[in-house]
Image (cartoon, grey):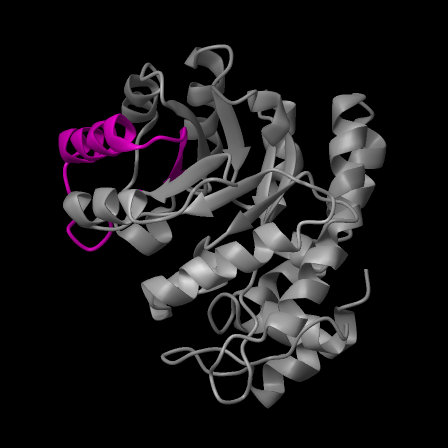
């Protein structure tokens, strides 16, 4: 069983850089891993920000393999495997080399809009089949259904479900989880702007979009929060306030990829149906991107 303290702090939901022809840009991916490793505590491969929905199984495996081979700081790795077919999720888990992976991040089933009981049974089946511990991922803005606090707490009793990435934006829901969860169950923010708030109510960190660009800011938020120096932690959190909104105006990771291009870390290429940042969004990011 994983030592869950390895997943305290910041996990970066790595983008997948692409070349202009749509192929994976491994050179930029190596730069990104080296850049983020300066401040994050673990790497998340194939989270939503990595555009897994537009990648083949082989491409996703190649990205995972590359990240593990270039993980020079030997950070823990969390890998995203989720979907709206329980059977297919279990098949993908069984078909993936998870030898260098510490845990799986699995999104609540989307599109189907299952009941809470359906969501519960889905995750129980996935957790039973998985050789690695599962981190639940609740993101109602993408899935069209909410994983409630009550269902999360039911799932938290399963020995192979170790935490939740909570991206509902509902702080009351997060507080209910924090208050009633098992001691070692990880409450992880799925919203960069709620990072400090989640720390303050008993959470252990964030799986972050903006940590691709600003890993050291998140490192400081963590250090100050754990030291209960909330004034300094606030100052770091506020540094991200202006840049956060533009990241999502034209879909994630469109804004982020343009930001990384401006920082000479990656480029702005995304895969359809996403398109590169508009001129208007580029101008907005250019004005505020230096934190």
Residue 167 versus residue 184 in the image, above or below: below
Of residue 52 and residue 58, the one placed in the foreground of this image is 58
Residue 9 versus residue 169 in the image, above or below: above
Q: Position of residue 211 (x, y in %)?
A: 67, 52
Q: Position of residue 215 (x, y in %)?
A: 74, 50
Residue 141 versus residue 128 in the image, above or below: below
Per the rendered image, the range of residues in magenta is: 108-137
73 relative to 231 in the view: left or right: left
Can residue 259 be seen in the rendering of this structure? no
Magenta-span inclusion, residue 98: no
Residue at 30%, 35% in the rendered image: 147
Q: Position of residue 196 (x, y in %)?
A: 67, 35
Residue at 49%, 32% in the rendered image: 171
Can residue 10 be seen in the rendering of this structure? yes
Residue at 33%, 14% in the rendered image: 157
288 relative to 200 in the view: left or right: right
The image quarter containing residue 230 is: top right
Of residue 26 and residue 180, the one placed in the foreground of this image is 26
Q: Position of residue 228 (x, y in %)?
A: 78, 21
Of residue 231 and residue 217, the one placed in the foreground of this image is 217
Magenta-span inclusion, residue 121: yes
The image quarter containing residue 51 is: bottom left
Q: Quadrant of the C terminus?
A: bottom right
54 relative to 290 in the view: left or right: left
């Amino acid at each position: 069983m994983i030592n869950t303290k390895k997943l305290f702090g910041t996990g970066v939901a790595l983008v997948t850089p692409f070349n202009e022809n749509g192929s994976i840009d491994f050179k930029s991916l190596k730069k990104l891993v080296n850049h983020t490793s300066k401040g994050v505590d673990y790497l998340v491969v194939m989270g939503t920000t990595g555009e897994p929905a537009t990648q083949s199984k082989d491409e996703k495996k190649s990205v995972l393999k590359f990240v593990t081979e270039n993980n020079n700081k030997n950070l823990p790795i969390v890998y995203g495997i989720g979907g709206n077919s329980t059977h297919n999720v279990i098949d993908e888990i069984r078909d993936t080399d998870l030898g260098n992976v510490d845990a799986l991040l699995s999104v609540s089933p989307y599109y189907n809009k299952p009941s809470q009981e359906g969501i519960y049974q889905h995750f129980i089946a996935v957790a039973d089949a998985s050789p690695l511990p599962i981190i639940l991922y609740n993101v109602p803005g993408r899935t069209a259904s909410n994983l409630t606090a009550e269902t999360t707490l039911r799932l938290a009793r399963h020995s192979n479900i170790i935490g939740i990435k909570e991206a509902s934006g509902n702080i009351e829901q997060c507080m209910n989880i924090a208050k009633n969860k098992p001691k070692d169950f990880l409450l992880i923010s799925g919203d960069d702007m709620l990072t400090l708030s989640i720390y303050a109510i008993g959470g252990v960190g964030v799986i972050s979009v903006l940590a691709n660009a600003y890993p050291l800011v998140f490192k400081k938020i963590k250090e100050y929060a754990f030291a209960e120096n909330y004034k300094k932690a606030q100052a770091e959190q506020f540094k991200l306030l202006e840049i956060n909104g533009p990241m999502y105006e034209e879909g994630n990771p469109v804004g982020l990829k343009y930001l990384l291009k401006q920082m000479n870390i990656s480029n702005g290429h995304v895969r359809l149906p996403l398109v590169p940042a508009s001129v208007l969004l580029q101008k907005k990011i250019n004005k505020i991107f230096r934190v």
